[in-house]
Image (tube, grey):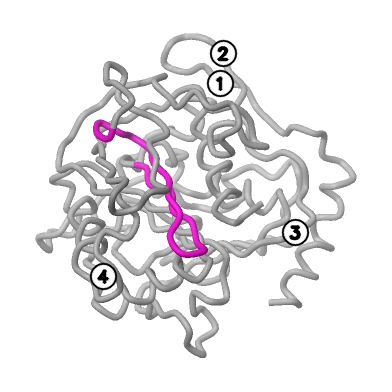
Amino acid sequence: MKNINKILILGMAMIAFSCSNESSSSSTPSNGSTSKIVTATTLTTTPKKFLFDATKAETAGNADWVIDADTSPQRIPTPLQSTITASTPETYWRGALSSWGIALVKLGHTVETLPSGTAITYGGTGAQDLKNYDVYVVDEPNIRFTAAEKTAILNFVKNGGGLFMISDHTVSDRNNDGWDSPAIWNDLMTTNTVKANPFGISITLNNFSETTSNRLSATTNPILNGSQGAVTQLKYSNGASMTINTTANPTVQGLIWRSTSTQSTSNIMCASATYGTGRVVVIGDSSPADDGTGATTDTLYPGWTELASHSRLHMNASLWLAKL
């Protein structure tokens, strides 16, 4: 890990020299206005390791929830991330989450994929054991976690790790095994041997599309007002809401609600919590992280650039999970 970080920091030196305080591009969101899409700001001095899951059929059906697909997602994205510069386009890697991965690398972090067939473990000796990473990202899992995997994930968070949970709408079972992502996430949180409802969050089995500006007003919240910019909107292109339970977890809080809802414990579109010494962020739709450039045979949405807030939300949340 130390050698990887040294190589990464050397590879990023040119970015630190050439990158301005904000690297951004312009796009026209659905409301017709022009907004900056912030992808990375300020090279970090504390590199973190992010692991993106590909063990739970994230490329099944018309999905592509990986940072670099290649023929099949492999541990190390190619071309090597040490060759990424401030001007590298997200198409350098081929996956619907490539913009997210490359934006993290531009900040000086390391990203890897947990390939299909690799065990999800914590506290073991494997090179990709969760103890070797700071943040674990699972975007729309389509295979149920085993009992051992649930224990590994929950203990990873309990002992200081960051977990980014992305769901999709109900009836989104892409591999036709009888489980879709809302049910899989709920199963992790309710049926495990570590703690019932450890995060105080449950995914509602619903399906809706809307754009909302109904967000928590706290200006100091690091996810909504972090180093990557202010989050003002969130658009669901078919997603599920969630409810929170502060009795189960006093730290859980809603961050963004449906447009006409009160800021209560239901109709939440994005939430966060801490558990033990770790942190969790949940978003109920996979479309906002989608950069629209995965496999041509998949159904993709340009969510990452559709609203400026989408990239900011995912990047701020990533850094908060990494305790930066």
Q: Where is residue 15 in the image (x, y as percent from the top left)?
A: 82, 47
Query: Vertical placement of 34 versus 137: above or below?
Result: above
Q: Give the SS element for disc 4.
A: loop
Say what amino acid the circle numbered 1 marks.
Ser
Q: Mark 3 points at which residue?
A: 46
Q: In which quarter of the image is residue 275?
A: bottom left
The stretch of residues the image draws in magenta is 265-283
In reply to whether residue 280 is colored magenta, the answer given is yes
In front: label 2 or label 3: 3
Under tag 3, what secondary structure? loop
Q: Is residue 132 left or right of residue 310?
A: right
> Which amino acid type is marked by label 4?
Phe
Q: Is mark 1 on a helix, strand or loop?
A: strand
Which of label 4 and label 2 is nearer to you? 4
Q: Which residue is drawn at 42% across and 41% down?
A: 290
CA–CA distance in space, label 4 to label 1: 38 Å
How far apart are the two marked residues, 3 and 1, measured between alpha carbons? 31 Å
For marks 2 and 3, give the CA distance.
33 Å
- The quarter of the picture where residue 59 lies is bottom left
Q: What residue type is labelled 2?
A: Thr
Dot 2 or dot 3, earlier in sequence = 2
Nearer-N-terminus badge (4/1): 1
Label disc, if present, on residue 145 of the rendered structure:
4
Comparing 169 with 319, the one in front is: 319
Q: Name the residue under label 2.
A: 34
Among the two numbered marks 4 and 2 on one chain, the one whose residue lies closer to the N terminus: 2
Residue at figure coordinates x 12%, y 59% from the top left: 176
Q: What residue type is labelled 3?
A: Thr
- Identify the mark at residue 27; answer none if there is no mark: 1
First in sequence: mark 3 or mark 1? 1
Point out the image quarter for the N terminus: bottom right
